[in-house]
Image (cartoon, grey):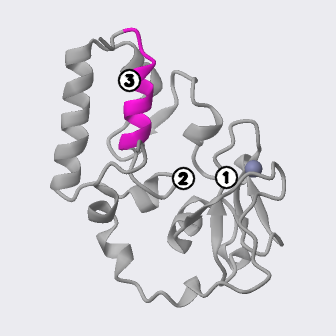
């Protein structure tokens, strides 16, 4: 439920129109992280390219998945498990890996951090959600390029709000 904020398709419009040539799953493909064994979430190739800190010659024409396990150092892995990219190879810090760090960005497009959200009143938190929604509506977000998970942050923002003292 928290993942279905409704805006991800809206926010990802540009990427949805790309030819789906990379989505042909091969029989041997797996979708579990080779490090922690948890199921990964498919991400667009351009998210991996935007986040990878080394030469993009290393990025293959294959499907990559995002590992959201907090204790696992792997951020992306290829669907055949032949490649993994860890937090040190990624240009951004990853919310899912440090979800309680106060300077950690939750909303990568409009720069709301864990600390901002946790230190805000309920009204201020509502204003933040409004700000994010307004940004999405104005087509100012770029979740697929900014957010390591490659999709909208609203579910994560709501989750941090739920655990904050300001939340009624
Ligand atoms: Zn993992």
Give the mark nearest the N terminus, 2 or 3: 2
As drawn, the label of residue 161 is: 3
Q: Residue furthest front?
A: 1
The quarter of the image holding the N terminus is top left
The quarter of the image holding the C terminus is top left
Q: Secondary structure at mark 2?
A: loop
Q: Which residue is mark 2?
A: 148
As drawn, the label of residue 67 is: 1
Question: Badge 2: how crowded within 10 Å, few (<14), some, or many (20+)?
Answer: many
Residue 12 in picture, x, y percent from top left: 34, 66
Magenta stretch in the rendered image? 154-165
Q: Quadrant of residue 139?
A: bottom left
Establish whether ligand 1 lies closer than 8 Å to the Cβ of label 1: yes
The CA distance from mark 2 to mark 1 is: 10 Å
Establish whether ligand 1 lies closer than 8 Å to the Cβ of label 3: no
Residue in the picture at 55% in, 65% down:
43
């Amino acid at each position: 439920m928290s993942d279905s904020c409704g805006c991800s398709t809206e926010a990802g419009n540009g990427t949805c129109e790309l030819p789906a040539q990379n989505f042909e799953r091969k029989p041997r493909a797996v979708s579990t992280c080779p490090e922690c064994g948890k199921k990964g979430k498919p991400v667009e190739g351009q998210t991996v390219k935007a986040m990878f800190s080394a030469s993009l010659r290393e990025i293959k024409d294959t499907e990559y998945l995002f590992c959201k396990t907090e204790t696992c150092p792997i951020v992306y892995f290829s669907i055949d498990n032949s490649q993994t990219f860890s937090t040190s190879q990624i240009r951004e810090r990853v919310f899912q890996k440090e979800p309680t760090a106060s300077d950690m960005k939750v909303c990568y497009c409009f720069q709301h951090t864990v600390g901002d959200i946790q230190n805000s009143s309920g009204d201020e938190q509502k204003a933040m959600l409004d700000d994010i929604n307004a940004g999405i509506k104005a087509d100012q977000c770029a979740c697929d390029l900014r957010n390591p998970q490659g999709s909208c942050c609203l579910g994560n923002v709501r989750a941090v709000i739920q655990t904050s003292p300001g939340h009624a």
